Amino acid sequence: MTGFAIACPIDSGTSGIADHYRATIRETGVPVVQVCNVCISALWPARLRCHCGADDLAWQPAGRNGRIVSRVSVDVPKEEWERFGVSKKMTSRLPYTTVIVEPHNWPGVRMVMLLETSGAAESLTGEVSLGVEIDGTSVVLTAGEV
């Protein structure tokens, strides 16, 4: 994998890793995957130690493209969003589609992303581009048309 490698501090526990993950995405503007610098395994979701026992971890770019593994479309009447657990921020996007994407650069990693397409979401299969949407402190991973 080429690109950058930003150290992933583990001294502040799992909530610290989550905060650092979002900060890294805001700083770089790309989706990232946690990687062990010892055995070069991708760790997803992020954790405090690699399966090899090492704690020398870094964020690396997930890559530009991936493939859709699964999808779920959410189409809840806006007046019922709270009962169904749809966040207030997402109600403006209803209906929307969430996809699980495997980045080509990191086989086996499955990332949940919001599908962004100009056409019908059901027509988009297979290859997608990977991106991020940053709004203040909020970070959303996105998948779009290639």
Image: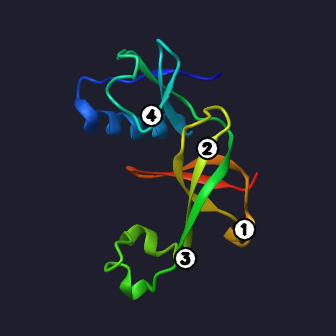
In-image side of 13 versus 63 (left or right)? left
Q: How crowded is mark 1: few (under 14 residues within 10 Å), some or many (20 or more)?
A: few
Per the image, label 4 sits on a secondary structure element best described as helix
Q: Which mark is residue 24?
A: 4
Mark 2: amino acid: Glu
Give the spatial CA distance, label 4 vs label 2: 20 Å
Q: Residues within 10 Å of mark 4 (few under 14, many from 20)?
A: some
Per the image, label 2 sits on a secondary structure element best described as strand
Mark 3: amino acid: Pro
- Residue for badge 2: 102
Per the image, label 3 sits on a secondary structure element best described as loop
Mark 1: amino acid: Ser
Residue 127 image position (x, y, % from top left)? 74, 50
N-terminal of the two: label 1 or label 3? 3
N-terminal of the two: label 3 or label 4? 4
Q: Residues within 10 Å of mark 3 (few under 14, many from 20)?
A: few
Q: Residue 118 carries which label?
A: 1
Tag 1–tag 4 contact (CB < 8 Å): no
Residue 2 image position (x, y, % from top left)? 65, 21
Q: In which quarter of the image is residue 85?
A: bottom left
Q: In which quarter of the image is the N terminus?
A: top right
Tag 1–tag 2 contact (CB < 8 Å): no
- Residue for badge 3: 95
